[in-house]
Image (tube, helix red, strand yellow):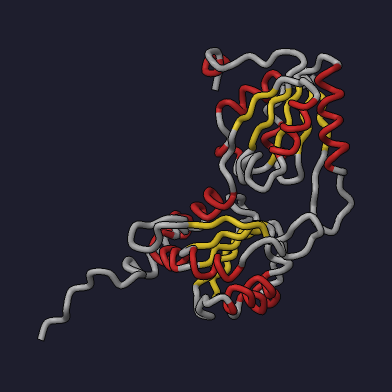
Amino acid sequence: MNDSTLSDLPSMDPGWVWLCGAGPGDPGLLTLHALNALRQADVIIYDALVDERILDWARPEAERIYAGKRGGKPSAVQRDISLRLVELARAGKRVLRLKGGDPFVFGRGGEEAQTLVQHDVPIRIIPGITAGIGGLAYAGVPVTHRDVNQSVTFVTGHDQSGQTPSALDWAAIAKGSQVIVVYMGMKHIARIAAQLIAGGRTPDDPVAVVTTATMQTQSVLETTLARAADDIAAAHLSPPAVICIGRAVLMRQALDWQSMLHGAPPRNTDPLDRGRPAESA
């Protein structure tokens, strides 16, 4: 791609902060606005799940600052990150805050944007493809399908304390949402599954666990709600992962396009058993 492709896109002015989603992993899922930002930024503050190949598109002279957060590991303090953005902008830098997925979907981008606005720092928001949609699409799981669901609920698997969110009405979610997508839920999947089953969800509800979504190392575990915790442990899976719960998972039997790329036929072209002709007498 030559620079003329980006010539009509916005200019990043000194003293501005652009909060940008880098997508779920695969560099090809980056938006043109994000690439445009990388080509202009003086400073890039990036998260743990931003692929190094994306950073290679930055200006060679751009300063790179790692601000990754990973559960159970030493991480940057959110307040420090937000105030660092303010400091850099006030120093006249063109600042790119690069976050995995979409900055406003469980990415704390709203908090950072709010801090910047409170300090009179001008901002631009650049959405990104979130793992709960893009990562599942790479696994062959559509989060919506006309014959399966007319609703989907996105939830986080832990709150500020690191525990399963107590503010969520799991019983209501179990009854009210046909498909549930859980971010950062692997650690607490046993408790989440138990609460959903107690709320009326069937133990046999299909579940897909997608780790390192959209990357070469992506793996997909198909299981059920009752067996999810045991099967995750048996498979020795580790985060990052996105978990999908509901009948939409069955569509992977027909839509596992990555396996098809390697010559595998669909396991079932009609996994919902719709419209099968009656057998001849």
On screen, residue 281 versus residue 156, left or right, reads left
Query: Which residue is nearer to you in this view: 182 or 55?
Result: 182
Query: Which residue is nearer to you in this view: 91 or 212?
Result: 91
On screen, residue 183 versus residue 78, left or right, reads left
Query: Which residue is nearer to you in this view: 59 or 167?
Result: 167
Tell me residue 184's x, y (percent).
Answer: 69, 58
Tell me residue 34's x, y (percent).
Answer: 62, 28
81 vs 159: above or below: above
**Snapshot quadrant of residue 241:** bottom right
**Snapshot quadrant of residue 67:** top right
Tell me what residue is drawn at x 74 percent, y 26 percent: 117
Tell me residue 94's x, y (percent).
Answer: 75, 18
The answer to whether residue 219 is visible is no
102 vs 231: above or below: above
Q: Quadrant of the N terminus?
A: top right
**Snapshot quadrant of residue 30:** top right
197 vs 264: above or below: below
Residue at the left extreme?
281
On screen, residue 99 versus residue 87, left or right, reads left
On screen, residue 4 versus residue 260, left or right, reads right
The answer to whether residue 156 is visible is yes
